[in-house]
Amino acid sequence: MDSATVRAHHHAAGMVVDGELAAALAEAADQENWLRQRGQTARDDLARPDEAAGSPGETEGRAFRRRLRLRHAIRLKAAALGRSRGGLTSKIHLSADRRCRPLSFVLTPGQAGDSPQFRAVLSLIKVRLPVGRPRTRPDAVAADRAYSSRANRSYLRGRGIKAVIPEKRDQAAHRKNRGSCGGRPIRHDPDLYEQRNTAERCINQIKVWRGLAFRFDKTPASYLAGLHLRGAILWIRSLQPR
């Protein structure tokens, strides 16, 4: 399991707002207006006499600018775009098998963390077998230190999956400081951890397509469709006899 950040073209930021998103924007604006009216009196009481509330025109201008910022933030969240590395970006969270074939994709804004998407990526794994139901539980999961957390390890332990995730240095130091209450040292299989590069190699094969190395699609559904198409091509090539 791994993740990769892709830069978004400025054309990708022009997603059309649908009815559901427009309703959410209106509700958020109404809530903001209500909170502003309730907090106006408290702010006026706390303000110094020389910094009293400005004219009604200035107050409406600040409210309008806040509404614009809120609308822009919700639009970026709906489009799975975020601010990181100096521009608009999206992040691909994926899982791959030992043959560099993708198993699942999750698309988030570029500033999203890796560990919160751990369960979402694993929940989308479905590998069809010749007979029976699709397999949804791998034997082991190899990931880097960004996915090292107590919640992720408990989740893998509950599903009977072997965790091949090294412990962070600060987590190890915190565990040692707690003494006997810190628990046992966390160990991982180094041989299986060496095969974690298959996820990175899978990302390299996906980014061969220019439309996936850089995001030009306005909607996240269109970009995810391209990811699944590229993943299907990689699977078909691996199944062909050599």
Image: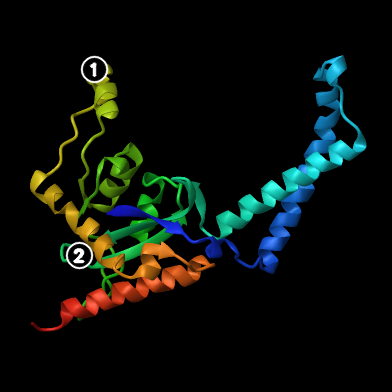
**In this view of the protein, which residue sits in the foreground, 222 or 126?**
222
- The reply to whether residue 145 is visible in this rendering is yes
**In this view of the protein, which residue sits in the foreground, 76 or 241?**
76
- 25 above or below 231? above
Quarter of the image with the C terminus is bottom left
Q: Secondary structure at mark 2?
A: loop
Residue depicted at x 23% and y 35%: 167
- Amino acid residing under circle 1: Gly
In this rendering, would 58 be left or right of 166? Answer: right
Residue depicted at x 45% and y 68%: 223
Q: Of label 2 and label 1, which has the lower sequence position?
A: 2
Q: Secondary structure at mark 1?
A: helix
- Spatial distance from mark 2 to mark 1, Cα to Cα? 41 Å
- 162 above or below 103? above
Q: Quadrant of residue 212?
A: bottom left
Q: Where does the image place residue 33, in percent across and percent down from the top left? A: 81, 43
Quarter of the image with the N terminus is bottom left
- 64 above or below 76? above
Residue depicted at x 32% and y 59%: 94
Q: Which mark is residue 179?
A: 1
Residue depicted at x 86% and y 16%: 50
Q: How many marks?
A: 2
In this rendering, would 112 be left or right of 202? Answer: right
Q: Which mark is residue 100?
A: 2
- The reply to whether residue 139 is visible in this rendering is no
Dot 1 surroundings within 10 Å: few (below 14), some, or many (20 or more)? few
